[in-house]
Image (cartoon, rainbow, N blue to C red):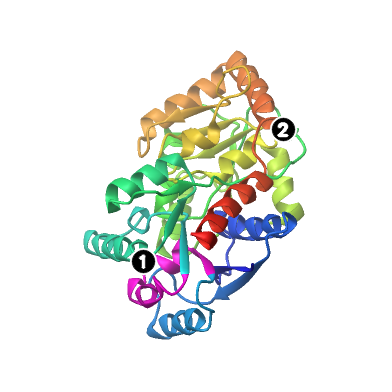
Amino acid sequence: MLSVLVVPGSSAPSGGDVYDRRLAEELRGLGHPVRVLTVPGSWPVPSARDRRRLARLLEGLAERTVVLLDGLVACGVPEVLAPHGQRLRLVVLVHLPLALEGGLGDTEARELHSKERRALGSARRVVATSDWARRHLEQQHGLSGAVTVAPGTDPAPPAPGTDGRSQLLCVASLTPRKGHEVLLAALALLSASGWSLTCVGPGGGAHAARLRAVVREHRWQERVRFPGPLSGADLEESWSAADLCVLASRSETYGMAVAEALARGVPVLATEAGGVPEALGRASDGTRPGLLARPGDPADLAGALRRWWHDPGLRRRLRHSAHLRRQTLPGWKRTAGAMAAVLDRERWA
């Protein structure tokens, strides 16, 4: 029986977009038909027109249809989901709890948290992308029976890097939650020369302007690049040159960029925010293929960068561990299999 996957319309790439797209592809490959319906809108804070569009979409589905909704669409509109909680088999996939997005005021965060709690109450099942996120949702919203379906990773060739030390790569949208300003502050504390940083990802507005102002203040225009969102060969070229993947997130449910780095044998320096340690994991010999620092702490991040920069033995060990971890990363077929089991369970419940 056909399942329906409802996803937000988006002009900028994100980990959630990749998850939704690869999930649909692999579900079909497993013989689990899925119809993808894209809903344009300013999610998770939609206009009245956006809400009406989603309501019409749900109204047009046959009774007992299994509907997997991306949480970016579902979690901010409990009033749209509630009339269909019994008629349809609603499953909500939460990529990021709404209140954890950076840059929110206290009032806005509380309102989004409240809406998310009510929206998830209309779902028959809630799916999170890491065990940390599942526990967080259970604790925050009093859920029971939430499940984890972690992202997969596509195989990729090993990255040759540059000199094995100097080229830092951050793949993350330019938003406060991703902590670019913490990374720049840490680099300012690093008494080393010769490094360069490429920050790949979408983003504009005041926050991105502040990041560029910091770069100008330190006269790093030749060392720090913001090429915007990249895909295909351009993104692969950036990964190929990377010696170290850096991710300074203040909060993160999983950290798909971490897994993407490890798929190429690139060591990682990330914060221990949320589900990042799950994405980093451990190699087959029990070693960790990267370093972890405290979120929002430039000094701690700088200390880890300093160790990376000055300890060639550490760099060799981390590269070896990253190559071992590369061989054990779960693929998208496993993700699709786990999700298919969730959808089938709701179909026959």
Query: Which is more N-terminal, label 1 or label 2?
Result: 1
Q: Is residue 200 above or below residue 306?
A: below
Residue toward you, 79 or 15 = 79
Examine the structure image and report whether residue 87 is included in the region drawn in magenta.
yes
Determine which residue is flagged by label 1: 122
Q: Secondary structure at mark 1?
A: loop
**The furthest residue to the top:** 313
Residue 332 screen position, x and y as percent: 66, 47
Is the residue marked by circle 1 packed among few (<14), some (14-19), or many (20+) residues within 10 Å? many
Q: Quadrant of residue 116?
A: bottom left
Task: Check residue 230 in the rendering and tell me which mark sits there, or answer none.
Answer: none
List x then y, in percent, for residue 133: 41, 45
| Lateral position of residue 267 relative to residue 294, left or right | right
Element under disc 2: loop
Q: Residue at x 58, y 26 (%)?
A: 289
Number of numbered discs visible in the structure rendering: 2
Under mark 1, the amino acid is Ser
Examine the rendered structure and indicate whether residue 291 appears above or below residue 210.
above
- Say left or right for 91 vs 1: left
Q: Please give the name of the residue rendered at 39% of the width and 71% of the height, measured from the top-left corner.
A: 86
Residue at the (73%, 47%) spot, across then down: 236
Looking at the image, which is closer to me, 301 or 3? Answer: 3
Could you tell whether 163 is left or right of 182 in the image? right
CA neighbours of label 2 inside 10 A, class few (<14), some (14 to 19), many (20+): few
Q: Residue furthest left?
A: 107
Magenta stretch bounds: 66-88
Q: Which mark is residue 162?
A: 2
